[in-house]
Amino acid sequence: MARFELKLPKMGESVTEATVTNWLKQVGDKIEADEAVVEIATDKVDSEVPSEVSGVLVEQLFAKDDLVQVGQTIAIIETEGSAVAETAKAETAPAEVEAIEKTVEVAKEISSTPTNFSDSEKFFSPLVKNIAKEEGLSVTELEAITGTGKDGRVTKNDILDYVKDRGNQVVVLAPIVAAQATVSVPVAQKASPVSVSGGDEIIEMDRMRKLIAGYMVASVQTSAHVQSFIEVDVTNIVKWRDKVKAAFERREGEKLTYTPIFMEAVAKALKDFPMMNISVDGDFIVKKKNINLGMAASLPNGNLIVPVIKNADQLNLVGMAKAVNDLGGRAKAGKLKPDDTQGGTYTVTNVGTFGSVFGTPIINQPQVGILALGAIRKVPAVIETPEGDFIGIRQKMFLSHSYDHRVVDGALGGSFVKRVAEYLEAFDADRDF
């Protein structure tokens, strides 16, 4: 028998960690090569980790809701034969190996501890949670610790310093467990909503909705949102699409929607106004080299996600249509990969899909702008000609631009959305696709 270490695979350049959300296989289960073993979640996308070998699952090294770093071993699979994949000890420094082994050992010992740190809405590493359990810390105490890690995350040193200042001595784990078995230890619990009338239905938010809620509140608290609106005549675009969409689908095998046409115009405008293609880092402005357009898309459960079209300015209309359809299709099927949602520099959302004329979208941090596309409508409009003005029926829509007033003033925010409108109104109705 050989032991194979199943590691958390690399999921993109900007993805460094994931949370275990569900074990699809339990200890003792047989596993086939390429069969999914565990479900994981990054901050935006759920995914599965498949096994590279066939065998039997003998160890789960992380529990549900534990945070795992890319490259860490998450499970041990026993295989037939002598071929063994490289172990973590051969790839990891001795000190790191010792720390990981200690984490695993402690995790096994305290599996019966009733304190459940998954009740916290904050992320804590497996090592931090295990130390907290070993030292008898409550969820409330752990949440109160000031973190010095990335994004304020509590590190090993933070919790050890807290324990030291707390005045507690290291306690053997067994007595703690025994004491908790006989004494009721008060632990902070989330208050469950109660229906006063008895007729209301109480629905807990799923993980994705909680994340979205957190992002939206954080964005409003971070950025000073300002909006600019402009009406656009897209009659030429509507006529052109009606004329070529059947031929486009026959030749390219893709449906031609309005979205890639709008994305093409936005990418051009970002090249003209590079200071809209930025992010904010403290007192510094990060000017992005690439134009990576986020596009809001629906998930199977009704939530929204923002996959990213990388280097959108380098795509022609056919390439843009293929990218839009691919990301939108995989979003609806729940098959987006973690890297598909990373690296966006500007976002576009189509509120017109739901019949809205315009909206005031919330900025997708750390970007500084987001454009909402309103519904296309037939409206009476004044048409200017050399012979004079007259009233005609035109296809029009509103563009709603939300931008971060900390770094984008009205002149830039308004000029940018006006340039998008100019590109759309100047669309060549005789162009090829």
Image: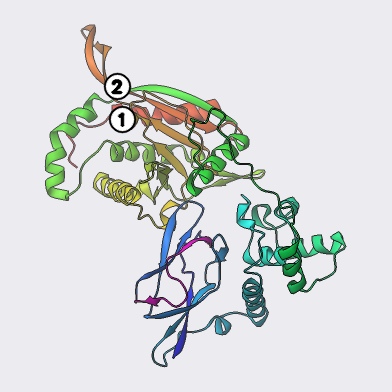
Position in image of residue 375 (x %, y %): 32, 26
Q: Which residues are magenta?
A: 16-33
Position in image of residue 12 (x %, y %): 45, 62
Image vertical order of residue 268 relative to residue 412, above or below: below
Residue neighbourhood size for the residue with mark 1, other residues' Cα within 10 Å, grouped as few (<14), some (14–19), many (≥20): many
Image vertical order of residue 120 relative to residue 359, above or below: below
Q: Which mark is residue 272?
A: none
Q: Is residue 194 magenta?
A: no
Dot placed on the residue nearer the N-terminal end, 2 or 1? 2
Position in image of residue 387 (x %, y %): 20, 7
Task: Judge from the rendering whether residue 112 lies leftward or rightward of residue 374; answer left or right.
Answer: right
Task: Judge from the rendering whether residue 43 lies leftward or rightward of residue 169; answer left or right.
Answer: left
Look at 54% across and 38% down and name the residue there: 216
Q: Which residue is mark 1?
A: 424
Question: What is the secondary structure assignment of the residue under circle 2?
Answer: strand
Position in image of residue 105 (x %, y %): 64, 77
Report the number of discs. Answer: 2
Task: Judge from the rendering whether residue 295 lies leftward or rightward of residue 112; answer left or right.
Answer: left
As drawn, the residue found furthest toward the bottom would be 82
As drawn, the residue found furthest toward the right would be 167
Front residue of 225/33: it is 33
Residue neighbourhood size for the residue with mark 2, other residues' Cα within 10 Å, grouped as few (<14), some (14–19), many (≥20): many
| Amino acid type assigned to the residue bearing label 1 in the image | Leu
Front residue of 208/107: it is 107
Q: Which residue is mark 2?
A: 396
Look at 34% across and 39% down and name the residue there: 263
Question: What is the secondary structure assignment of the residue under circle 1?
Answer: helix
Q: Which corner quadrant holds the N terminus?
A: bottom left
Front residue of 167/285: it is 167
| Amino acid type assigned to the residue bearing label 2 in the image | Lys
Look at 63% across and 71% down and name the residue there: 107
